Amino acid sequence: MSNSQDKTFTLTNDQTGESYKLPVLDGTQGPSVVDVRKLYAETGHFTFDPSFTATGSCKSRITYIDGEKGILQHRGYKIEDLAEKSSFLEVAHTLLYGDLPTEKELAKFTKDITYHTMVHDQVNYFFRGFRRDAHPMAVMCGVVGALAAFYHDSLDIWDPEQREISAHRLIAKIPTLAAMTYKYSVGQPFMFPRNDLSFSENFLYMTFAVPPEPYKVNPVLARAMDRILILHADHEQNASTSTVRLAGSSQANPFACIAAGIASLWGPSHGGANQAVLEMLDQIGDKKNIPEFLERAKDKDDPFRLMGFGHRVYKNFDPRANVLKKSCDEVLEDLGIDDPRLELAMELERIALEDEYFVERKLFPNVDFYSGIILKAMGFPTSMFTVLFAVARTVGWVSQWKEMIEEPSLRIGRPRQLYTGPDARDFVEMKDRK
């Protein structure tokens, strides 16, 4: 980031005629930003930016997105290359430490994560406090936040070694907790993690294996799961990541911060989008109904929306979608599933991509469209979709949290407001109120 003294943004007060010069900061890529940190002190005014859509909340070296060009990079590496050529733990190492690992670094990192996958035995009893029909995300919010009660030996956020241990524990244990959450919901016994399996293989094993019989991990499904995790690992300052950073700015412990991120991710406008795709397909019901629903999607007065098409950030195309479409095709071909809903999804994709309305507006299928189809084909219930998103995004949250804690200028987050309530008024005694 650079700040040139002769590169400023001039702000003029129409009431007083006074002008103020604000510094303009340049990043490595992307638009420059106007530094408004001293605006209130110099002008007596705050900025007003609901939802913070035009406000840079932090400096970060982790992820870069250009929504207009359909670019997503982690530490400068293109997401397409990472998804095609690396493993999830390679990407996790890259997000955490800044570079693709060497063979030796990856071996050590893999061992560090693998040997943290087990959870404290008393966590098993913690699950019994939840109803069997509880939503998996409600359970995850509880058990992840509770980890601070089991691993209080690594809660000193100012100790680099303890930060490292907490980061490894979170990345390693959340897949275990996610699998336990699923097992608890279906009444099956928990499966212990296996150190001889890869990250994604181990997660599938803990989720779908049962004690009475051997479980062989399907390599096609394991690779698809690895891609899903890579493609969801981080996405810059989205709602859940911003939540993690805001919670962390108060110096809360990392387990509490990640639990806050999970709670934010739970919202249907954020992590629940792939679940919404399956629910939309249920609403359409049959291939013959697709034209009718596409017309409804074009009608601004109709509440129906085509879920899984287009993206809030990507105005051209979602760079993750093409990668996941390949995995989607591989999974469906390998499993040979005869599922009307999956056939409906493929037909909807075909028809929408031939419709001028959607093509002109660049409303292409996004990552949520394909991930929902893949997860359904794998056998995950829709209630688990957002949990799997959390499994993937944990490494991004942890990397962002770690970066923020190591920032020398760290201060507690404190957004401002435009107050529109009543002006100051006198207290009225009960007998005089009307």
Image (cartoon, helix red, strand yellow):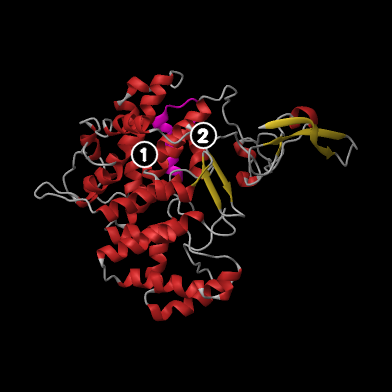
Residue 59 lies left or right of residue 85; in this view the side is: right
Q: Would residue 105 be visible to someone looking at this image?
A: yes
Residue 48 in the image: state x and y as whole percent.
70, 42
Residue 127 in the image: state x and y as whole percent.
24, 39
Q: Nearer the viewer, mark 2 or mark 1?
A: 1
Residue 14 in the image: state x and y as whole percent.
88, 42
Q: Main secondary structure of the magenta part?
A: helix
Quadrant of the image occupied by residue 163: top left
Residue displayed at 45% across by 73% down: 350
Residue found farthest to the right: 17
Residue 228 lies left or right of residue 243; in this view the side is: left
Q: Earlier in the sequence, mark 2 or mark 1?
A: 1
Residue found farthest to the left: 212
Residue 330 in the image: state x and y as whole percent.
33, 61
Q: Which residue is mark 1?
A: 89
User: Which region shows up in magenta?
Assistant: 248-264
For the residue pair 64 and 288, the one nearer the viewer reads as: 64
Q: How many neighbours does mark 1 have within 10 angstroms: few (below 14), some (14-19), or many (20 or more)? A: many
Looking at the rendered structure, the kind of residue marked 2 is Arg
Instruction: Please tell me the numbered disc located at residue 245.
Output: 2
Quadrant of the image occupied by residue 159: top left
Q: How many neighbours does mark 2 have within 10 angstroms: few (below 14), some (14-19), or many (20 or more)? A: many
Q: Secondary structure at mark 1?
A: helix
